[in-house]
């Protein structure tokens, strides 16, 4: 069975106006995509598809938890995620100029697969800074790993003969 078949919407005979859909996303979904930063998660997806005469507007709203890795200690990290994105699907037989926001399909398409759009919405919602943080996710970094990292850094510094570089490094470390 194709794990992504749940994310196919039949569009034949769809009336003009709003159509709500609900999806669930879990580990099986993420297995279908190649991305080491997003390996697991459990999310609810609300989609409102608005059909207009020559196009469809799709507003995706994803909400849940994703599993990724901490930028500081490299440990597994669970993060809450909520994000909204809009995509437009146009129907045309000639103009196939796809962009990031606009997908062009032939007039005779009878279904659309929204799995990639859901995946994109989740990926775009990933925070750029991903670290263990007591106040955000109630977890803290792996102290053992941090100790090893700073040990390694200290060793590097003592072996460093370029004074200007160590001074700069100190400046950067103090900023943290
Ligand atoms: Zn961490």
Image: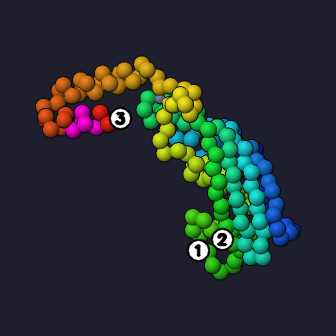
Question: Which label number is shown at residue 32?
Answer: none
> Residue at 35% of width from left, 35% of height from top?
176
Look at the image and say whether residue 111 sits in the magenta stretch. no
| Quadrant (top left/top right/bottom left/bottom right) for the N terminus | top right
Is residue 144 visible in the rendered image? The answer is yes
Q: Which residues are magenta?
A: 168-172
Query: Where's residue 98, x and y in %?
Result: 59, 70
Question: Which label number is shown at residue 176?
Answer: 3
Look at the image and say whether residue 170 sits in the magenta stretch. yes
> Residue at 62% of width from left, 42% of height from top?
81
The answer to whether residue 39 is left or right of residue 3 is: left
Q: CA distance from mark 3 to mark 1?
A: 45 Å
What residue would you read off at disc 2? 104
Regarding mark 2 in the picture, which secondary structure is present there?
strand
Query: Where's residue 54, x and y in %?
Result: 74, 76
Query: Where's residue 17, x and y in %?
Result: 82, 68
Instruction: Check if mark 1's residue and mark 2's residue have beta carbons within 8 Å.
Output: yes
Crowd rating for badge 1 (residues with CA inside 10 Å; few <14, some 14–19, many 20+): few
Regarding mark 3 in the picture, which secondary structure is present there?
loop
Crowd rating for badge 3 (residues with CA inside 10 Å; few <14, some 14–19, many 20+): few
To which quarter of the image does residue 52 belong? bottom right
Q: Is residue 87 above or below residue 91?
A: above
Q: How many marks?
A: 3
Q: Nearer the viewer, mark 3 or mark 2?
A: 3
Q: CA distance from mark 3 to mark 2?
A: 47 Å
């Amino acid at each position: 069975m194709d794990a992504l078949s749940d994310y196919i919407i039949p569009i034949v005979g769809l009336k003009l106006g709003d159509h709500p859909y609900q999806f669930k996303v879990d580990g099986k979904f993420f297995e279908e995509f190649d991305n080491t930063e997003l390996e697991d998660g459990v999310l609810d997806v609300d989609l409102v598809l608005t059909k207009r005469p020559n196009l469809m507007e799709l507003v995706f709203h994803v909400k849940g938890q994703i599993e990724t890795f901490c930028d500081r200690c490299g440990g597994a990290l669970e993060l809450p995620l909520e994000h909204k994105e809009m995509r437009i699907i146009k129907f045309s037989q000639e103009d196939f100029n796809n962009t990031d926001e606009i997908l062009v399909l032939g007039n005779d398409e009878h279904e659309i697969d929204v799995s990639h759009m859901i995946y994109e919405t989740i990926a775009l919602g990933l925070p750029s800074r991903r670290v263990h943080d007591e106040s955000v996710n109630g977890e803290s970094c792996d102290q053992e790993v941090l100790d090893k990292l700073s040990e390694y850094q200290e060793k590097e510094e003592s072996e460093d003969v370029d004074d200007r570089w160590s001074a700069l490094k100190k400046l950067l470390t103090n900023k943290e």
